[in-house]
């Protein structure tokens, strides 16, 4: 399903295109948390991953950027497993965090991913649609394997960013300056790299 949107500013919707070897979760989490510390009104969720002593992924948490609350979104499948399973109760809590962000007066909404679940019509797809339709800037990440589904979902609208902190910061600097000028306010220009 393609979103039925009026012609929004295409730069307000940005997707970080990433590959399996990119650590997009850390990039988004560090960026979002730095903006919060700098006083920018940011909501939505980012993902923090935990690894065992061998460097193997063993847990995932969604961090609610409005409250700082950590929400467990994975279930352990046991010591012999090489995978994890998403926790439906945790995903429901993450969904509520994004819905709260959509309903709040924010400068930026971040949703950690538009991935396989969302491409298939599940996950946080409807929350991402609501965030886009709110007209506020939205930042998410899309794996290379889901870029076609993302493009179809957004009707080819939006900006695709390289998986680079500097590129994301440049996008945000441009968008926040333009948004501030439209509101008649001084632009919020924290240097998120220095705020970490």
Image: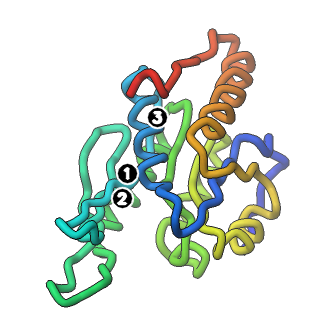
* Residue at the (45%, 52%) spot, across then down: 99
Mark carried by residue 94: 2
Q: Is residue 172 above or below residue 94?
A: above
Q: How many marks?
A: 3
Q: Locate residue 44, reporting x and y percent.
A: 44, 47
As drawn, the residue found furthest toward the front would be 54
Would you say 157 lies left or right of 111 here? right
- Quarter that holds the C terminus: top left
Q: Write down the residue under mark 3.
A: 42
How much space separates mark 3 and mark 2, taking CA atoms? 15 Å
* Residue at the (46%, 34%) spot, across then down: 42
Density class for disc 2 (Cα within 10 Å; few <14, some 14-19, many ≥20) is: many
How much space separates mark 1 and mark 2, taking CA atoms? 5 Å
Is the Cβ of the residue at disc 1 closer than 8 Å to that at disc 2?
A: yes
Q: Nearer the viewer, residue 50 or 109?
A: 50
How much space separates mark 1 and mark 3, taking CA atoms? 12 Å
Is the Cβ of the residue at disc 3 closer than 8 Å to that at disc 2?
A: no
Q: Write down the residue under mark 1.
A: 97
Q: Is residue 23 above or below residue 105?
A: below
Image quadrant assignment for residue 171: top right
């Amino acid at each position: 399903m393609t979103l039925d949107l009026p012609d929004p500013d295409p730069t307000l919707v940005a997707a970080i295109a990433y590959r399996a070897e990119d650590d997009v979760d850390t990039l988004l989490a560090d960026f979002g948390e730095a903006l919060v510390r700098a006083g920018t009104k940011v909501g939505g969720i980012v993902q923090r991953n935990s690894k065992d002593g061998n460097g193997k992924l063993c847990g995932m948490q969604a961090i609610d950027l409005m409250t700082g609350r950590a929400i467990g979104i994975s279930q352990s499948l046991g010591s012999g497993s090489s995978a994890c399973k998403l926790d439906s109760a945790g995903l429901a809590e993450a969904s509520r965090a994004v819905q709260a962000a959509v309903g709040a007066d924010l400068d930026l909404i971040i949703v950690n991913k538009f991935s396989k679940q969302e491409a298939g019509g599940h996950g946080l797809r409807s929350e991402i649609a609501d965030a886009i339709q709110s007209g506020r800037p939205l930042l998410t990440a899309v794996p290379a394997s889901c870029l076609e589904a993302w493009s179809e979902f957004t009707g080819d609208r939006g900006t695709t960013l390289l998986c680079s902190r500097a590129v994301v910061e440049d996008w945000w600097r441009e968008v926040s300056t333009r948004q501030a000028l439209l509101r008649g306010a001084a632009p919020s220009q924290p240097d998120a790299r220095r705020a970490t």
